[in-house]
């Protein structure tokens, strides 16, 4: 039976030499008497003592007696505090010993899982992704945005089993309530014929899986998270719904000068925003060929370019804006346009957009919306943790997944080679012979990017370089000359790794393996696009961390690629611990848990650095 509370405290005291049980054998045991009671007793004693001393004719004054009383009280309180402290200490020691005993019983795997759960719980405290106004007013929308789009009758009448079969056929996995039907042709999606013709001319004839499910979902007004491998046509899946929404608004009531935009597409880099803008312009341009369609006006809003270059865009209303976050906020703050009528927000490479660095900017952008919007997030990589976080800001979201989030494109042949640091440059030249140009070479180090370009130029290879420290003109020149075929090789840092669509790249060389496996997935994804095949050669050596190599090993295995012997030999410490081998919820890497996630480490490092800056600012 459980001992009573009082008894338990006595038992605890008994373990300490100062306290012994009052069992009759311990004469020096002092039973506990509450301080209030002791004070009463003392007062009674003193008053009887006063009376006696008065009788005896003693000369003590009442002031002396009060001082004495106070002194004794303080002494008693001090003793009582000491007793309480000892009890608390004993209790704490007991809890500590109990935990140590329990921990000793746990396996390494269980301990690791507990540690991971603690880290996850700490990350879960991130502030909801919504504007401050929405948060302050407690605005929460419960219904998706209404649109006039409906699927063709024969598709609307399909029974759930038929829809499941179509999704299975294309490896589409969906989550969410009342998911709109997948549609296997652009015509059945009710896309204007002028756009369909334009797509045909560009060899876009049948929708890809992310388009089959993503376009009807977005056309229905639903918030969504779209995840599909690199080069699988996500851009069309989120641009077409924006264009259709703008078209509907313009047809209902044309935008006047100074009005709009209706929709905004956010991208993490200027190059990607420029590329998406060019797509939007091409598709809206195709619309005008249809005599029933009014012209739609779009604006590119990125840092490094003068807005006066696009002053013509402000002469009418603006239907669509493609932007990077910093410049967009600047334009909104300067009131060059407003989001008063904006109903569509899409984030491309969304995991990057809502991750550290851009998260606050995204919240800031959301605060300019004055009404409910449809929010869409697209990426090839989106770890579970980011999906969960994003969902908080979405209304009845639909998750559309084609393959595992973060999996490599299966059309890319991945070759991993062990190359000593000092041999890399020479071996690079050899590798360039594997395929005809164009070739992209990636390194995360800007100085290395410059060194490689210099070396290649010396060897007579037509190479351009792009990284974050180059001027906007230099960056644009590199992209333009590489895209046009004027240059054979582009040496790039991460800037060019996400979303950029260069046609017909047959070979990507990763000169330095990035720490985060997601970056590797994006980098190799510059080849093998739109159903074509490509090769990715990656150099690793002693300086590549074991855990990065493990992530790589699992990724190769998942994609059914050859695992080289030196990677095969690397053992996963989680196997010895008996842990379940699941992907890291923070970065999606398959070779480690959250407690040794490089992305999490980087996030912590940045957080500490930002706290330091704040602290310094306080002085
Ligand atoms: N239905 C289609 N059929 C054939 N090609 C298509 C189709 N849709 C898009 N494409 C082409 O596929 C290429 C890759 O498309 P896109 O850039 O949208 O890929 P993505 O999924 O956004 O890739 P990433 O994750 O790297 O950003 C583009 O050149 C595009 O024109």
Image (cartoon, rainbow, N blue to C red):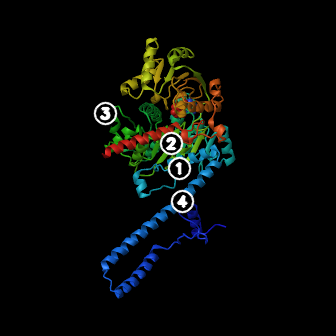
Residue corresponding to mark 3: 308
Q: Nearer the viewer, mark 4 or mark 1?
A: 4
Mark 2 or 3, closer to the camera: 2
Q: Is residue 510 above or below residue 97?
A: above
Disc with the residue nearer the chain's start (4 vs 1): 4
Sequence-wise, the earlier of marks 2 and 3 is: 3
- Residue tagged 4: 90
Residue 503, visible in the rendered structure: yes
Mark 2 vs mark 1: give the one in front.
1
Measure how far apart labels 1 and 3 are at the Cα level: 48 Å
| Quadrant where the image shows the N terminus | bottom right
Callout 4 secondary element: helix
Q: Are marks 2 and 3 in contact (CB under 8 Å)?
A: no
Residue bearing mark 1: 121
Q: CA distance from mark 4 to mark 1?
A: 30 Å
Label whose residue precedes the other's in the sequence (3 or 4): 4
Pointer 2 with pointer 1, Cβ within 8 A: no
Q: Is residue 417 left or right of residue 80?
A: right
Q: Nearer the viewer, residue 412 or 345?
A: 412
Q: Residue at x 57, y 16 (%)?
A: 434
Q: Picture coordinates of residue 313 (x, y %)?
A: 35, 36
Query: Could you classify mark 4 by the number of other residues whose Cα lies within 10 Å: few (under 14), some (14-19), or many (20 or more)?
Result: some
Q: Secondary structure at mark 2?
A: strand
Please say whether residue 257 is visible from this viewpoint: no
Please, what secondary structure does the residue beneath circle 1 have?
A: helix
**x, y (%) of residue 283?**
47, 34
């Amino acid at each position: 039976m459980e001992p009573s509370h009082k008894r338990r405290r006595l038992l605890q005291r008994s373990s300490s030499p100062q306290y012994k049980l009052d069992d009759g054998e311990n004469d020096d045991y002092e039973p506990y008497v509450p301080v209030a009671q002791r004070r009463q007793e003392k007062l009674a004693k003193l008053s009887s003592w006063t009376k006696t001393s008065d009788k005896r004719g003693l000369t003590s004054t009442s002031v002396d007696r009060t001082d004495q009383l106070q002194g004794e009280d303080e002494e008693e309180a001090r003793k009582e505090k000491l007793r309480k402290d000892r009890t608390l200490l004993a209790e704490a020691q007991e809890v500590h010993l109990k935990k140590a005993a329990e921990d000793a019983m746990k396996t390494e795997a269980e301990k690791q899982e507990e540690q991971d759960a603690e880290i996850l719980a700490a990350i879960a405290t991130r502030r909801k992704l919504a504007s401050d106004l929405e948060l302050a007013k407690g605005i929460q929308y419960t219904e998706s945005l209404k649109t006039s789009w409906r699927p063709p009758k024969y598709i609307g009448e399909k029974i759930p089993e038929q829809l499941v079969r179509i999704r299975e056929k294309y490896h589409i996995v969906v989550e969410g309530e009342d998911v709109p039907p997948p549609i296997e042709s652009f015509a059945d999606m009710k896309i204007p014929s002028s756009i369909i013709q334009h797509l045909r001319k560009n060899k876009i004839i049948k929708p890809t899986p992310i388009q089959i499910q993503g376009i009807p979902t977005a056309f229905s007004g639903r918030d969504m998270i779209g995840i599909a491998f690199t080069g699988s046509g996500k851009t069309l899946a989120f641009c077409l719904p924006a264009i259709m929404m703008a078209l509907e608004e313009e047809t209902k009531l044309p935008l006047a000068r100074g009005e709009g935009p209706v929709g905004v597409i956010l991208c993490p880099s200027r190059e990607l925003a420029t590329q998406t803008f060019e797509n939007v312009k091409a598709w809206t341009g195709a619309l005008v060929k249809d005599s029933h369609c009014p012209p739609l006006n779009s604006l590119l809003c990125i840092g490094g370019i003068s807005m006066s270059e696009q002053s013509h865009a402000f002469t009418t209303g603006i239907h669509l804006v493609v932007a990077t976050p910093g410049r967009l906020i600047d334009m909104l703050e300067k009131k060059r346009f407003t989001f008063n009528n904006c109903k569509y927000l899409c984030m491309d490479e969304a995991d990057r957009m809502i991750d550290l660095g851009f998260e606050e900017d995204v919240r800031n952008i959301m605060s300019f919306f004055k009404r409910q919007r449809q929010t869409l997030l697209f990426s090839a990589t989106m770890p579970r943790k980011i999906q969960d976080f994003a969902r908080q800001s979405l209304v009845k979201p639909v998750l559309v997944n084609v393959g595992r989030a973060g999996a490599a494109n299966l059309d890319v042949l991945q070759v991993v080679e062990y190359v000593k640091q000092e041999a890399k440059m020479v071996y690079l030249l050899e590798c360039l012979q594997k395929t005809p140009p164009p070739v992209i070479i990636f390194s995360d180090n800007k100085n290395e990017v410059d060194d490689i370009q210099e070396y290649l130029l010396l060897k007579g290879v037509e190479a351009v370089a792009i990284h974050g420290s180059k001027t906007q003109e230099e960056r644009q020149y590199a992209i333009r000359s590489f895209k046009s075929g004027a240059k054979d090789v582009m040496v790039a840092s991460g800037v060019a790794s996400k979303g950029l669509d260069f046609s017909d790249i047959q070979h990507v060389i990763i000169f330095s393996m990035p720490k985060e496996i997601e970056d590797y997935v994006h980098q190799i994804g510059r080849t093998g696009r739109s159903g074509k095949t490509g090769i990715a050669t990656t150099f690793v050596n002693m300086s590549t961390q074991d855990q990065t190599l493990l992530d790589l090993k699992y990724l190769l295995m998942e994609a059914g690629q050859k695992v080289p012997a030196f990677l095969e030999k690397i053992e996963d410490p989680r196997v010895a611990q008996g842990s379940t081998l699941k992907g890291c919820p923070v970065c999606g890497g398959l070779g480690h848990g959250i407690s040794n996630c490089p992305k999490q480490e980087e996030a912590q490092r940045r957080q500490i650095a930002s706290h330091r800056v704040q602290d310094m600012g306080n002085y």
